[in-house]
Amino acid sequence: MTTPSTVTPTTPTTPVTPTAPAPRRIDPSAAVAGTTPHNSFRETWVQTMAMAWRALKKMRRKPEQFFDVLIQPLLFTAMFAFIFGGAISGSVADYLPVLIPGILAQTALTVCMATGVQLREDMDKGVFDRFKSLPIARIAPLAGPMVADLIRYGIASVLTLVTGLAIGYRPGGGVLGCVGGVALTVFAGWSLAWIFTWLGTVARSAQSVQGISMMIMFPLTFLSNAFVPAETLPGWLQAFVKVNPVSHVVSAVRDLFNDGAVTAEVGWAVIGCVVVIAVFAPLAVRSYSRKM
C-alpha cells in the first residue's frame, strides 16, 4: 500500500516593488548660471552640440529658412551699389569699399534677428517643455541653435563678398584680410544674436519678437556708418553713430577688407561683442530658466 506523498507548504513571498530613483534636484542658482551641478563643462559642450545638430536637421527640413541668407545679400548688395554708388561716392567702384563691409554688418544683424523668432516659436509649440524634463545644462537649448546659426552667418557673409567681387569690388587686404573680415562679421552676428535670444524668452509671441527686433535692427544699421561716411551726417547724429556698436564692426571690417590691417577698431569691435555676450547671455539663460 502506498502512502500519499506529503506536500510541503511554501511560504508566500512578498512581491518586491521596484523603487523609482530619487528625482534629480537642480539647484536654481546653478540653472541661472547655465549649468546644473551634475553637468561638467564637457557634458555641457556635448549637450550643446546635440542641440546644434537638432537645429541643423530643422534647417534641412525647412530650406525656406535660408531664403534671407541666400537672397538678401545678392539683392541688397547690387541694389545699394547701383542706386547709391554714384550719388554718394561718384561711382559704383568708389562706393564698393564703403558699401560691402556695411552690407556685411546689416546682413549679419538681419540673419541673427531670426534666432529670437524661431526660439519663441519653439517655446510656443511646447518643445521646451520636453527639454525642461531632461537633465541637461540650461544653456544648451539656447546655445545649440545659435551654434548652428553660425553656418547661416558664414553663408550670408561669403555671398555678400562674392557679390561684391562680381560687380567690381577688389579688396586691398587680400585673402587674409577677407577671411579676417568674414570671421569678425560672423562673431559679431553671433554675439548680437544673444540680444534677440533674450527677447525670444521675454516676449509673448513670435510676432512681437519680430516687431521688437525690427525696431532694434533699423536704428543700429541705418544710423551707423554702414552706408555713408559719418562725416557727412549732422553733428547730433554723428555722436550716436560714434557710439553705435555696429559702426565699430563696420569700421573694423573695412580696415581688414581694404587694408588688411588689424587696427584699434578691430580691438574695439571684439571687445564690444564680448561685452554684449557677457550681458545678454546670462540674461537669456536666467529668463529661460524662470519660464522652465
Image (cartoon, grey):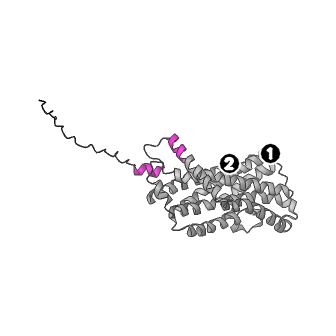
45 relative to 252 in the view: left or right: left
Q: For mark 2, give the secondary structure.
A: helix
Q: Residue at x 78, y 44 (%)?
A: 176
Residue at 72% across, 52% down: 252
At x 52%, y 46%, the residue is: 47
> Residue 121: x percent and y percent?
55, 63
SS at mark 1 in the image = helix
**Part of the protein shown in magenta:** 21-47
Whether residue 272 is visible to the viewer of this picture, yes or no, is no
* Residue 31 on the magenta span: yes
Quarter of the N terminus within the rendering: top left
Q: Considering the image in quadrants, where does the C terminus appear?
A: bottom left
Q: Position of residue 78 (x, y in %)?
A: 81, 63
Tell which of 106 and 248 is nearer to you: 106
**Callout 2: 10 Å neighbours few (<14), some, many (20+)?**
some
- Residue matched to label 2: 267
Residue in the foreground of this view, choosing between 63 and 192: 63
Where residue 231 sits, quadrant-wise, is bottom right
Residue 3 picture location, percent across and down: 12, 31
Callout 1 environment at 10 Å: few (<14), some (14 to 19), or many (20+)?
few
The answer to whether residue 33 is magenta is: yes
Between circles 2 and 1, the one closer to the viewer is: 1
Q: Identity of the amino acid at label 1?
A: Val
Quick one: which residue is furthest to the top in this view? 1
Q: Amino acid at mark 2?
A: Gly
- In the image, taking residue 65 as reference, residue 71 lies left or right, namely right
Q: Which residue is mark 1?
A: 175
Return the residue nearer the eye: 229 or 204. Answer: 204
Which of the two discs, 2 and 1, labels the residue nearer the N terminus? Answer: 1
The image quadrant of residue 236 is bottom right
